[in-house]
Image (cartoon, rainbow, N blue to C red):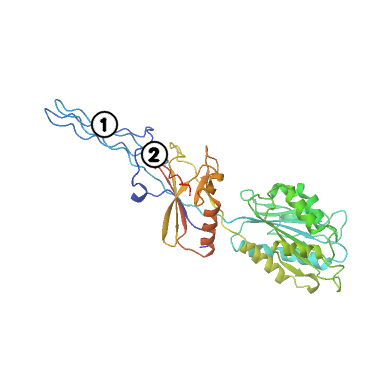
């Protein structure tokens, strides 16, 4: 199923315990000594060590006793690799949407439409399970210019045109109270960046929507270059959408928005003809593209060991299942090592890991499987056995 599948952090099954030797000796219960044999009899077999901690520390091997006048007892086997299980959802890539609206004297109808329809637009994205943020750069009521102010009502915005950001996810709504004239929408995206940069998510897909009845004072080439240079790689791969005029003729058009159209064509965004005054199909198309360009994230939280347990980063194993086939993945030390072992994973921090991160080629495979609605898709993380190391190809 697209976007969501179970991540089992360990499996309490025999399959994951096969061929797992003794642990690292961390005291979790020692093996019992075998009793001494009498005469020429051998000592009894030492009992195995107690089961080790499920996050990587195994038990100690038992030690055979010495028979009186006989041979030594055999050493007991060590504690088996224990494992624990918990599940989590794979997250969809979040989306940040930045909107500018021309508030010049001729744009009263468009500003009202944005104000009235932004909630419906956002709800269609919410319904698809995408975590999204809307940054609206427009002047609110009471501003110094006072031309066609916009105040988006709840539930997207907070009361009185206020921000409405979920502190746990960063999703929601922020309004940058700044008047936008007919030529300077892109300039305001750049100049106002310090006022909204703190709410953008680095891992989020970025979409910019420009609405104007006029041309831009900036060229597309200049805007794109300056945007990408603002805070690399914040806007890498962004989509430019525009509701503008294809030509300068028409009741609602002051000039052709050729530069905006160039941006749409360059990034594969959505174009809407402003003179048609039928914005809903354009809004729907943008919403659909947001959904279509959203992928699942290729990293998974390792989690926190239970009280009394210690995570052993060298005793984590990862398995991937799709289409009825399960493969055990190898680990590489750094992202740079992915080039020699593409279908592998690495830790976010090799010394103190908190996440398992798929190498790019493996991530592409996982996302392709998700797009095909593979129903048995899952990632499993098991703790307690020595990690499988990826073999360079």
Q: Residue furthest left?
A: 39
Residue under label 1: 63
Residue 241 drawn at (x, y percent): 73, 63
Quarter of the image holding residue 212?
Answer: bottom right
Q: CA distance from mark 1 to mark 2?
A: 20 Å
Residue 225 drawn at (x, y percent): 76, 53
Residue depth check, mark 1 versus mark 2: number of the one nearer the observer: 1
Q: Residue furthest top?
A: 69
Q: Nearer the viewer, residue 259 or 295?
A: 259
Residue under label 2: 53
| 88 left or right, relative to 165 | left
- The residue positioned 20% from the left and 32% from the top of the image is 73
Quarter of the image holding residue 52?
Answer: top left
Q: How many dots with numbers? A: 2
Mark 2 closeness class: few <14, some 14–19, many ≥20 residues within 10 Å? many
Q: Is residue 204 above or below residue 302?
A: below
Q: Is residue 235 above or below residue 29?
A: below
Residue 181 drawn at (x, y percent): 85, 59
Residue 295 visible in the current orientation: yes
Mark 1 closeness class: few <14, some 14–19, many ≥20 residues within 10 Å? many
The kind of secondary structure element at disc 2 is: loop
The kind of secondary structure element at disc 1 is: loop
Residue 329 drawn at (x, y percent): 45, 50
Q: Nearer the viewer, residue 126 or 244?
A: 244
| 99 left or right, relative to 338 | right
């Amino acid at each position: 199923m697209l976007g969501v599948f179970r991540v089992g952090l360990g499996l309490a099954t025999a399959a994951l315990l096969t061929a797992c030797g003794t642990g690292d000796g961390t005291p979790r219960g020692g093996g019992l000594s075998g009793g001494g044999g009498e005469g020429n009899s051998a000592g009894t077999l030492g009992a195995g060590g107690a089961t080790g901690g499920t996050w990587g520390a195994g038990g100690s091997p038992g030690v055979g006793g010495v028979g009186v006048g006989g041979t030594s007892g055999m050493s007991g086997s060590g504690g088996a690799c224990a494992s624990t299980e918990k599940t989590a959802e794979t997250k969809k890539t979040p989306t940040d949407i930045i909107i500018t609206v021309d508030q010049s004297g001729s744009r009263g109808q468009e500003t009202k439409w944005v104000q009235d329809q932004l909630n419906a637009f956002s709800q269609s994205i919410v319904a698809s399970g995408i975590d999204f943020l809307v940054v609206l750069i427009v002047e609110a009521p009471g501003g110094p210019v006072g031309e066609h102010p916009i105040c988006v009502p709840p539930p997207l915005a907070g009361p009185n045109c206020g921000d409405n950001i979920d502190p746990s996810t960063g999703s929601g709504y922020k309004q940058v109270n700044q008047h936008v004239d007919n030529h300077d929408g892109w300039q305001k995206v750049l100049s106002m960046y310090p006022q909204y940069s703190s709410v953008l998510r680095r891992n989020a897909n970025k979409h910019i929507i420009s609405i104007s009845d006029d041309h831009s004072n900036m060229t597309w080439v200049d805007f794109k270059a300056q945007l990408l240079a603002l805070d690399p790689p914040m806007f890498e791969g962004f989509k430019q959408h525009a509701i503008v005029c294809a030509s300068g003729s028409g009741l609602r058009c002051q000039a052709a928005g050729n530069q905006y159209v160039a941006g749409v064509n360059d990034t594969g965004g959505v174009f809407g003809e402003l003179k048609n005054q039928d914005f809903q199909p354009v809004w729907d198309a943008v919403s659909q593209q947001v959904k279509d360009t959203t992928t699942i994230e290729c990293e998974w939280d390792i989690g926190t060991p239970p009280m009394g347990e210690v995570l052993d980063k060298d005793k984590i194993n990862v398995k991937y299942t799709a289409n009825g086939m399960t493969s055990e993945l190898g680990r590489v030390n750094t992202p740079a090592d992915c080039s020699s072992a593409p279908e592998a994973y690495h830790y976010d921090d090799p010394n103190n890991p908190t996440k398992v991160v798929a190498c790019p080629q493996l991530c592409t495979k996982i996302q392709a499987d998700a797009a095909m609605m593979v129903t048995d898709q899952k990632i499993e993380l098991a703790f307690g056995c020595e990690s499988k190391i990826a073999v360079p190809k």
